[in-house]
Amino acid sequence: MSDIDLRGNAWKTPASAYLETRPSRYAIPDSPLSCHVTMRDGCRLAVDVFVPQPLEAEDSPASYPTIVVFTPYFRRFRLREPGAEPSPNTAKYRDAFVPKGYAVVVVDVRGTGASFGTRDALRSPTERDDYFEIADWIVAQPWSNGRIGSTGISYLGAAACFLASTGHPAVKAIAPLFAVSDIYSEQLYPGGLLSKVWVQAYDELMVALDQDDRALLARYPYFNDPRFDGPERVDADTDGSLVQAAIEQHRNNFALADLAPEFAFRDGATQHDPALDSGSCSPYRYLEGIAQDVAVYSVSGWYDGGGYANGAITRFLSLPNHDSRLLLGPWDHGARTNISPWRSHAASDFPMLAEVLRFFDHHLMQLPTGLEQEARVHYYSVHDEQWHAAPTWPPAERAQRLYLTADAESLSPACPATESDRDTMASFNWSTGRQTRYERLGAANIEDYYPDWSERQRDLLSFDGAVLTAPLSIAGHVVLNIGLAGSQPDAALHVFLSEVEASGEVRYITEGMLRALHRKTAPCPPEYRTTWPYRTFAKADAARLVPGQTERLHFAMLPVAWTLAAGSRLRLSIAGADRGHFPQVPYGRPPRLSIRLGGELASYLDLPIRG
């Protein structure tokens, strides 16, 4: 099966069809204009500018709308010899938009590439202020028509949100792709648990890039072409002295492994600067700065890290007065892989940038795209292998409650008549493996996700639903209410949802996690609206367990749309650790976990059912 937009009838005009109406009338220049732009504090940022070159004289407007991309992963590499693509991180945007009549500007963010300065945090407020000045510079150029859009994957997408939140009047549309809204709960500490694999891999990648460490960079498949020769110079840097001076400044960049422990709570700030907390590095903190005339298209996938899909959904929900749209597909981080076990091949066929082009055409070029006739939400259901449209999120029409029961460890619509507990010992040696949603965040190239899930989940305490007599379609957040007692003052609860096929094959669907310390829930704030249980992760709300005392843990799994086949069963599995991805809780003291079955604190899950 393919994830192409023609599967199902979700769009009145699929992007693949729209693209056929937009012939390329412009050429990409052989090389960009490359220069430094000086910021308010004297820091110089390296900028590449690709101005469309008309193929016909009549297609030569005086100026163009601009797509600006901010990247810490090099706007361009210098090449030892020709033949390689010098912009592995951003070429896709150049190639998609310049031929259609957009100027494309690519910026090395402060402290990276050929830009000067240092990075003091992950997307710091200082960097956000730079974006406003870059927008000022763009609109002052003779090739600019004064209208700006921004897009990009991951860091680049969050930067687009930062740009829009500055309130610059030229910014009219952004398309953050696979981008977080809250770095605490979606990136650094999903469920209140440190994402170890991401922190380590990100640190190594940024050291390799920022300090031009070629040997270290060779570990990363997207940046290891032997023809790469460090960051490309700006045009005026004829002898390379400027880029070398910039690299020397980059050696003072922050290390995420040092910063992350200071953000152990969402309201935790650095000791040296009480104003610098995880929120000050998160797009949601500045959401109210996005003017109502700025359109926002949020895109993510079902295996997009440890919460990036939540970031896309909350961004959509939190901007109700904007032209806000949402796209959720069968993708990993960046849509490099179609994660469906029923795909015909690993690569995604979805015309992502054609979809984004239509969005920008509508809002920046004000072309008649028909976008206003499309639903605001589109999502792909795995195993159903179809695209669906909805007016809002979530699209589920009803909830189905299933209780965890002692009867053959099953899931049942009936609450157990008697109260009991089911114990399991946390194993700090158990792991989801090395081909998971988390490795992809560390820039690993993964094509086959959870390939040994049938074997791995056998070691877990599991509860099975009845054999399905008809397909069952889930769309949204599966929400759990677990009555839990632990033998230690803290615990980590990792839960997994699987489809057990009639053949016995077990397919990973999604997962959720929560550190018991953070079990307290709270109303969601307007800048981070949710339809799932929200928690502050604040230090004041943290509470240890009383060993042996049962508490309620109410939390959501990561969102998904998945159709279980007739003859399959739903399985919920519970673990107390995920080695390699998250830390032990508590260190060296694996707790005994007692799951309450029946009674006032009965454990159950609520399934969001479509159809």
Image: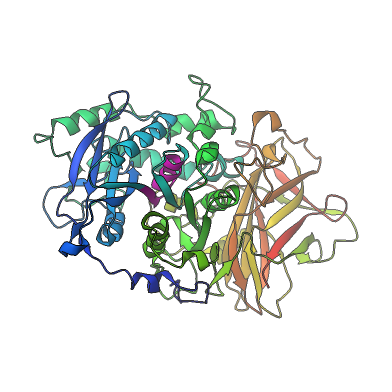
Whole-percent x and y of residue 402?
77, 63
Instruction: Give the image quarter of residue 479.
Output: bottom right
Judge left or right: residue 599 versus residue 150.
right
Question: In this view of the protein, can residue 395 be seen by the observer?
Answer: yes
Residue ID at (43%, 50%): 174
Quarter placement of the C terminus: bottom right
Is residue 409 visible in the rendered structure shown here? Answer: no
The furthest residue to the right: 417
Image mark count: 0
In this rendered view, identify the residue nearer to me: 60 or 360: 60
Q: Is residue 314 magenta?
A: no
**Residue shown at the point (52%, 54%) measured from the top left:** 323
Is 142 in front, or is 330?
142
Q: Position of residue 2 (x, y in %)?
A: 44, 74
232 to 20, vertically: above or below: above
Q: Which residues are magenta?
A: 148-164
